[in-house]
Amino acid sequence: MTLIITSLQGFFKQFPDTSKYVVAFSGGLDSTVLLHVMHKLNLSLHAVHVNHHIERECDQWEQHCKRICESWDIQFS
C-alpha cells in the first residue's frame, strides 16, 4: 500500500491548485482503494455513486458506498 500512496502522492502534486477531487465510486475494490488512498493523502474529496438500478443488489451497493464515505467523512452523492 505504501508504494501506491507514494505514487499517487507524486501524481497529485501536479495539481496544487485543485480544491476538490470528484471520484466515481462504485464500491468495488478499485474505486475503494483509490478513494481510500486519496483520503489518506488528505485530499478534499467528493464521491459520486451512480445507481443504475440494473442489479438486484444495486441499493445495497449504494448504501455500502454511503457508509464508507460517512466513516471517512467524505462528501457523497
Image (cartoon, rainbow, N blue to C red):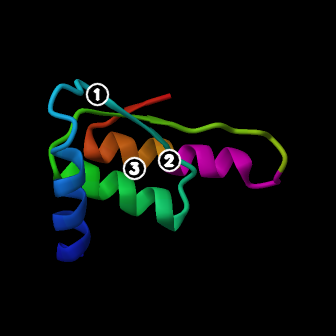
Q: Nearer the viewer, residue 64 or 11?
A: 11
Q: Are marks 2 and 3 in contact (CB under 8 Å)?
A: yes
* Residue at x 50%, y 28% (from the top left corner): 77
Q: Give the secondary structure at mark 2.
A: helix
Where residue 15 appears, as percent x and y from the top left, is 22, 36
Where residue 7 appears, as percent x and y from the top left, is 22, 65
Q: Which mark is residue 20?
A: 1
* Residue at x 69%, y 39% (from the top left corner): 51
The span from disc 1 to disc 3 (Cα, nearest Å) is 18 Å
Name the residue that disc number 3 marks: 68
The amino acid sitting under disc 3 is Ile
Instruction: Give the class, few, some or many, for how many residues have Cα within 10 Å of label 2's Cα (few <14, many ≥20).
Output: many
Q: Which mark is residue 65?
A: 2
Instruction: Give the class, few, some or many, for how many residues have Cα within 10 Å of label 1's Cα (few <14, many ≥20).
Output: few
Q: What's the magenta bit mostly, secondary-structure-wise?
A: helix
- Magenta-colored span: 55-64
Counting every numbered tag in the picture gives 3
Looking at the image, is mark 1 or mark 3 earlier in the sequence? 1
The amino acid sitting under disc 1 is Lys
Q: Are marks 1 and 3 in contact (CB under 8 Å)?
A: no
Where residue 18 appears, as percent x and y from the top left, is 24, 27
The span from disc 1 to disc 2 (Cα, nearest Å) is 19 Å
Q: Which mark is residue 47?
A: none
Q: Residue furthest front?
A: 14
**Magenta stretch contains residue 52:** no
Q: Give the secondary structure at mark 1.
A: loop
On the rendered structure, is 22 left or right of 19? right
